[in-house]
Image (cartoon, rainbow, N blue to C red):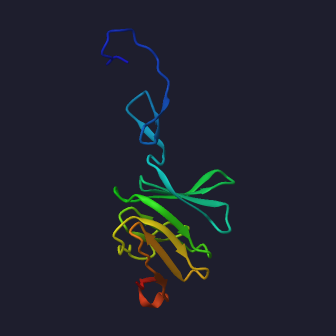
Amino acid sequence: PPGATIAARQFALRDFTVGTTTAVYAHVHTDGTDVSVILRDHDAAVHALAAHPSQPHFYVGSYSGLLKVLDYEKKTVVASRWFKPGQMIRCIAIDPRAEYLAVGFTNGVVRILDAISLRDVCEAFHYARDTITHLAFAHNSRYLAPADADFAVSVFKVTSESTGEPWIYLG
């Protein structure tokens, strides 16, 4: 390249791929300044894993705020979602009917997502004072019980869609 800091003959450089310490993989095109991001992955500790009850999918969440759904037969990413900085995923659970995915965060927030699209189905709940450490759905998928590091357990209940909020806090 002509802009090198040491005077030298020009040389040809092929396109190349790099990986960063923050788990970003990119393809660098040498005839310009174009960089194409190939993959962004977990760049922090993975603390949350859950298996789909009937599909060959599993869910992975990490302290980087990345939630991924992976198909372990096809070895592909089915869906992914990044949460805001500081939203570190500590635990996840999928309900027995595979409709909802509960996500517990280190800041005490619990989010209930659609298990396929990973979109919020209701407003986030923030009733815990400490990290959500466990999440468990009832066998009929109507109740969710998160436990936090302060040894408190809450209960959420699914409601009829006509009330406006699909999930409510019971206590």
Compared with 139, 119 (above or below) is above
Quadrant in which the C terminus appears: bottom left
Compared with 91, 9 (above or below) is above
Q: Looking at the image, which is closer to me, 138 or 73? A: 138
Q: Looking at the image, which is closer to me, 162 or 14? A: 162
Compared with 161, 37 (above or below) is above
Q: Which residue sits at x=37%, y=60%?
A: 87
Residue 26 horizontal side relative to residue 56, left or right: left
Q: Which residue sits at x=38%, y=74%?
A: 125
Quadrant of residue 128 in the image?
bottom left
Q: Looking at the image, which is closer to me, 26 or 110? A: 110
Residue 3 horizontal side relative to residue 145, left or right: left
Q: Residue 121: x, y in percent?
A: 46, 75
Residue 97 horizontal side relative to residue 168, left or right: right
Quadrant in which the N terminus appears: top left
Q: Which residue sits at x=41%, y=63%?
A: 105
Q: Which residue sits at x=36%, y=9%?
A: 8
Residue furthest to the front: 151
Compared with 14, 65 (above or below) is below
Q: Residue 29: x, y in percent?
A: 45, 31
Residue furthest to the top: 8
Q: Residue 25: x, y in percent?
A: 48, 39
Q: Residue 162: x, y in percent?
A: 46, 90
Quadrant of residue 36 in the image?
top left
Q: How many labels does the image show?
A: 0
Q: Looking at the image, which is closer to me, 52 or 164? A: 52
